[in-house]
Amino acid sequence: MAKDARGWSKPDSADPTRFVLLRHGQTGDSVKHLFSGSTGTDPALTELGHQQARAAAERLRVMLENIRPQAIIASPLQRTQQTAEYAAQALDLPILTDPLLRECDFGDWEGYTMREIMGKYPELSQEWMRDPTVVPPNGESIAEVNDRVREFRESATKQWEQQTIVVVSHVTPIKSFIHQGMGNIPQVFYKTYLDLASLSVVDFFQDDSSTVRSINLTGEQLR
């Protein structure tokens, strides 16, 4: 089957490696709408964040009831590790940690709101919201995050060929999976919304074709 036809029907070739992508629950920075990347304060989950992570783990358990996932791999940051603990309990799997799954390093923008950044860096912030190669001062571009997610994804697709794995990560890395699954469309980074503790699913095949199966599943959508 042609690579660009994956979304039309189940391919006749080998099964894909399925990435079930879980965003972490709420943190104090989430409440304040702050840039919270990989070099800031490394916030923990709030009480609501723990509730969200627990509920997401139960959704995972039901979703994967007939599909035994082979691994849970999480970003090393505290909020993802805490979220992953609930998934690990629900799925009876250990947590593997990979730094390639960490959130973007927002550099000097860490700890500020988008409104504050737009006031302090009006031209650069506008460019950043249009161009994934733009780098925040002393930080990391979205394109750089996408590159390291691709490195992780290609390795994981080989290691867990035709298996299902759960990835617990952050907005930018999860959007990178979706971006790659949709054929590297940059608008995905700017026009896709991911709720806290939401689930998305992307399949990748050995021939590097892909299918985006779902984006931003939450408890409300599953009722």
Image (cartoon, rainbow, N blue to C red):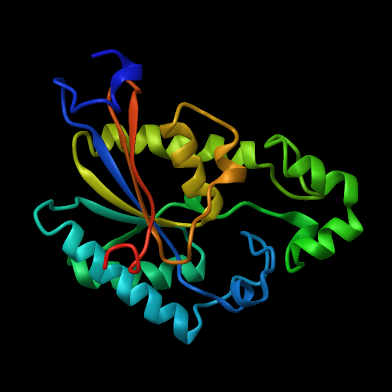
Name the residue furthest top: 2
Marker count (numbered): 0
Residue 102 in percent (x, y) is at 53, 54
Residue 155 in percent (x, y) is at 36, 34
Position of 111 compared to 221: left or right?
right
- Which quadrant of the figure has residue 114? bottom right
Q: Residue at x 67, y 76 (%)?
A: 32
- Looking at this view, is 97 or 102 the one in front? 102
Q: Residue at x 34, y 23 (%)?
A: 209
Residue 127 in percent (x, y) is at 80, 40
- Looking at this view, is 157 or 201 the one in front? 201
Rendered position, 55 above or below 24: below
Q: Residue at x 30, y 19 (%)?
A: 5
Asked whether the viewer can see residue 11, the reply is yes
Q: Quadrant of the C terminus?
A: bottom left
Name the residue furthest left: 66
- Which quadrant of the figure has residue 93? bottom left
Rendered position, 198 above or below 156: below
- Looking at this view, is 36 or 200 the one in front? 200
Position of 208 compared to 26: left or right?
left
Residue 1 in percent (x, y) is at 23, 14
- Which quadrant of the figure has residue 57? bottom left
Asked whether the viewer can see residue 88, the reply is no
Position of 156 compared to 71: left or right?
right
